[in-house]
Amino acid sequence: MFASLSKYLEDPFLNTLYSRVRKAGSIKSISVDLTDKCNLRCDGCYFFREGMDSFGKASEAGFDDFIAREKERGTNFVTIVGGEPALELERLRKLRDNFKVNVATNGLVKIPKEGFEGLPFGIAIWGDADADIHLRGSGKVNVFEKALRNYHNDDRAFFYYTVTPQSEPGIIDTVRKCVDNGNRVLFNFFSDPQAREESFELIHERILAVIDLYPDMIFTTSYLSHVVSTGRLFDQKWSYEVCPNFSVNDPQNETRKGNGNPYSPHFNAYNSDLRSIRKCCTSVAGDCRNCYDVWQHFAWIIANFKKHLATGEDFANWLTTTYVFYLVNRLVDYDEGIILLPEIHSRVNRSIINNC
């Protein structure tokens, strides 16, 4: 293994990426619902669908105690979700002051620049510009357009673009609007635990097309898109049995912890009371086979480092995707990393991916 790794790192570009990831260190992450409130009620949102708004909000003392407990536990990275985190700016500021963070927001409430400099956050958009109005704005509010105005040329913000097979025709035009607004794009894939398994083949082709059009503006690597859209990672098929991001302190996950597949040994997904936890970030007890959440697939790839050492192409796929995860979350130097995005995209052997 180490002989192969040394050989792969003779490539100066790969050596640069690997050195920066290693310097950033290991991630000890958690997910936090900052509030149980939201200023939208989006059609299909997992938060309300699974009753995650029923836990109430921690008191100020409870919030401070939570930060102290997690710092003592060694947490160094927090994914901040909700409800809507922008409704709790002071608590958001406290988390940012104590941990590396990334924030998921709907974009309606503008997160100010003062006091939140360099804060990475993903702004949701669903489907395409037209579908987004109906799915998130109840046919009345153009949430996407307001988010574009709020974050015009704001390099903290990227659009967290959730796609479905039905939204494929509008992808290129929607990405163009984000890019013209000065914002980068990370693709997410819509998950419906009650639905049949979806086919994302055409979505994958569109993602390849926008990478070619905007190689310096797309955070989704073609390898990441392949893994999510096919649900395949070498000999594994995506399921609860292989997902590495689940609450390690939740008793229902004890069997999963012992099945031999890698997992994140620090991770917990906290409800808004900041004491109770749930099965994982996006589910209380859902069927993981129909989960296409991109953060969990990022984690699946990253956790399977050893599987990617078989060939130079496999290692390049792992390293470029892992580096982009660190880049999106500003765990490596952002300005240095952004310059490398076009080269990162060029390092993935698409013929291998497309023939897997």
Image (cartoon, helix red, strand yellow):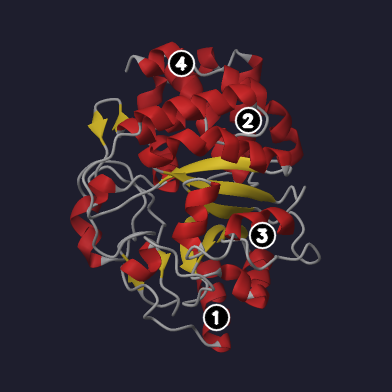
**Element at label 4:** helix
Cα distance in 3D space between marks 2 and 1:
36 Å
Q: Determine if residue 27 is in view.
A: no
Along the polypeptide, which appears first: circle 3 or circle 2? Answer: 2
Cα distance in 3D space between marks 4 and 1:
46 Å
Residue depicted at x 34% and y 14%: 355
Q: Are marks 4 and 2 in contact (CB under 8 Å)?
A: no
**Element at label 2:** helix
Residue depicted at x 78% and y 67%: 115
* Mark 4 or 1, closer to the camera: 4
**Element at label 3:** helix
Q: Is residue 66 above or below residue 122?
A: below
Percent x, y of residue 324? 57, 36
Percent x, y of residue 3? 46, 15
Between 81 and 62, the residue placed more toward the observer is: 81
Q: Quadrant for the N terminus, please.
A: top left
Give the residue number, with chain letter if any, for mark 1: 63
Cα distance in 3D space between marks 3 and 2:
39 Å
Along the polypeptide, which appears first: circle 3 or circle 1? Answer: 1
Give the residue number, with chain letter if any, for mark 4: 350
| Mark 4 nearby-residue class (10 Å; few <14, some 14–19, many ≥20) | some
* Mark 3 or 4, closer to the camera: 3
**For residue 146, which numbered disc appears in the image?**
3
Percent x, y of residue 160? 54, 48
Along the polypeptide, which appears first: circle 4 or circle 2? Answer: 2
Along the polypeptide, which appears first: circle 4 or circle 1? Answer: 1
